[in-house]
Every structure is written in structure tokens, then in C-alpha cells.
Image (cartoon, rainbow, N blue to C red):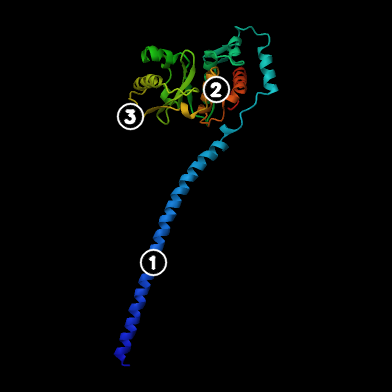
Amino acid sequence: MTVMESYEQERIEYLRTLRAWDETVKEVLFFLREIQKKNLALLLFYIKVKSRLTRIVKCFNDDSSEPIPNYDREMEEFVREVLEGRKDEEIVAEIGVSFVSKQNLKTLEGLKWLDGEVINTYLQLIQRRSTNSSTLPRSYCFNTFLYDKVSKIGHSAVKRWTRKVNIFDYDLVFFPIHLGNHWTLAYADIRKKTLRYCDSMGGKNPKCLAALFDYLKIESVEKTKRALCDDWKTESISGKIPQQQNTNDCGVFSCVFADYISRDAAFNFSQADMPNLRNLVKYELLKGKMLKE
């Protein structure tokens, strides 16, 4: 074999080897791309599942999801001592600008329909807790009379109610709603630019949302000299919250909704908890302090 023939044979073997390596590299790259695609899909799936699981775990681990306190003998004894010997018309609890008499508190017994003053005073207790806390959302609570005037007359009827306060300085603004024979709750989440409606009987009440949204729009111009941002929205969340199974507990549901929402807490109560919650509301009002401060 001549030198040239030997060189030519080596060149052919070299090119054959290069082609083999080229095919191997192509196969490896193809394999890596497929793995990358699958890994990306798995990664996206993992992120999605993890996000949901994190929310679920947070719900169960959050302080708000601890078992609801039981109305115990010590609480019962405290309530008995405070109310014993008091006349029905006597004021037994005064929080902020609201107060309740012994007669008002009797509406928390059994299946009685809740008195408006109980709701007003309980919301004032929630507001005071917010004021005294460095960690809870800042909450402002209107009374049960605001919606009646706003829905019938408009912002002008209650313009002076906030002459010393700017509700847009708060995180949450609560509106207890009296519909004649039913209590519900609406609230504005200033942080999320959302006005929500909560009805323990599933009602959506777009009329209520529209009236309160008009109020917020005018109030914004009055207090901030600016119109509400276009990204504000209204929604009913009544289909996503605990529902009452009778016609008596709507007021208690509304109070408890406000308590949980004011703590950014997940709802963990139901109709079965109402007898216990009625007693706890009474205890908190007489104590002048929320159990979850």
C-alpha cells in the first residue's frame, strides 16, 4: 500500500467517525430537548400544584383556621355576673359610638332575629381591635343606617358622616346591610380595589353593590380629589361563603363574616356553629374585647 493509499484510507475512516459522532450528538441534543420539554411541563405542573397546596396548607395552618373557641363555663359565669340584676333598658356594653342594652343582647338568645344595635356595636368592637393592632388590616365600620340612606337618597344624605375621616386611608370598609327582613354584609377592600357582597342566603343583590359603588365613587372625589381607578370592581361572593340553614341567623352570620374578613381569615364555620357563636358574640361585647385580638 502506497503512502497515498494509506492516507486516503485514514481520511475515509476519519470522515466516517465524524459522521458517527455527528449523528450521536444530534441524538443527544434531541433527547435533551425532549427532556427539557417534559421537565418544563412537569415544572409548570409542579408550580401550579404547589401554589394550590400552599394556599390549602395556609388555610389550615393560619391562626384563623384554629378551632372556634367553645363558650365555656367561665364565660357563662362572667356573662351571668355582668347581667344579673340589670334592667332590660340598661346599657351593658358601649363600644365607640355604639352601645347595647340588656334587652338588645337578648336577641342573641336561641333563634331570635338579631337587633341592629348588636350588629353596630360588634362592628365597632372589630374596628377598635383593628385600631389597636399593628398586624391586622385597618378596618372602618359604618353602622346599619348608612345603606338605607344611600340606597334611598344617595351620597348627599350621608356626606357629613365622614367629615372627620377618610375611608380610603383604611384597608377594609364594612357596610352592614338591612334589607327589611334580612341582614347581609358588604365591604370594600381598598387594597384590592374591590367591593364585595356577602349574603348567607346566597343573594347577589346587584342593586346594593351599585348603590354602594356610586357612594364610593363620590366619596373618592370628595376625599381624595380623584375618581376611583378604572380597575375597581364589584362582585358577590355569596356563593363561596358559609350559608345559613334557617331564617333566623343572618345577623350572626353577618357579624362573623366581618370578624373573619377583618383578620384576612379563612371561613371555618357553618350553621352548626351558630348557637356557640351567638354566645361568643355576647361574651365579646360584654368583655369589650374580641377573643382573637
Residue bearing mark 1: 27
In this orientation, which residue lies closer to the viewer: 283 or 53? 53
Residue bearing mark 3: 230
Judging from the image, what secondary structure is the residue with disc 3 in? loop
Mark 2 / mark 3, whichever is N-terminal: 3
Side of 229 relative to 293 (left or right): left
Residue bearing mark 2: 245
Q: Amino acid at mark 1?
A: Glu
Judging from the image, what secondary structure is the residue with disc 1 in? helix
Q: CA distance from mark 1 to mark 3?
A: 54 Å
Residue that lies at the very extreme toward the left in this rendered image: 4
Quadrant housing the C terminus = top right
Q: Position of residue 65 (x, y in %)?
A: 57, 33
Quarter where residue 28 is shown: bottom left
Q: CA distance from mark 2 to mark 1?
A: 65 Å
Kindly identify the residue that appears in the image at 56 percent across and 30 percent down. 268
Q: Position of residue 154 (x, y in %)?
A: 37, 14
Q: Nearer the viewer's eye, disc 2 or disc 1?
A: 2
Mark 1 / mark 3, whichever is N-terminal: 1
Q: Position of residue 285 (x, y in %)?
A: 59, 18
Mark 2 / mark 1, whichever is N-terminal: 1
In this orientation, which residue lies closer to the viewer: 137 or 175? 175
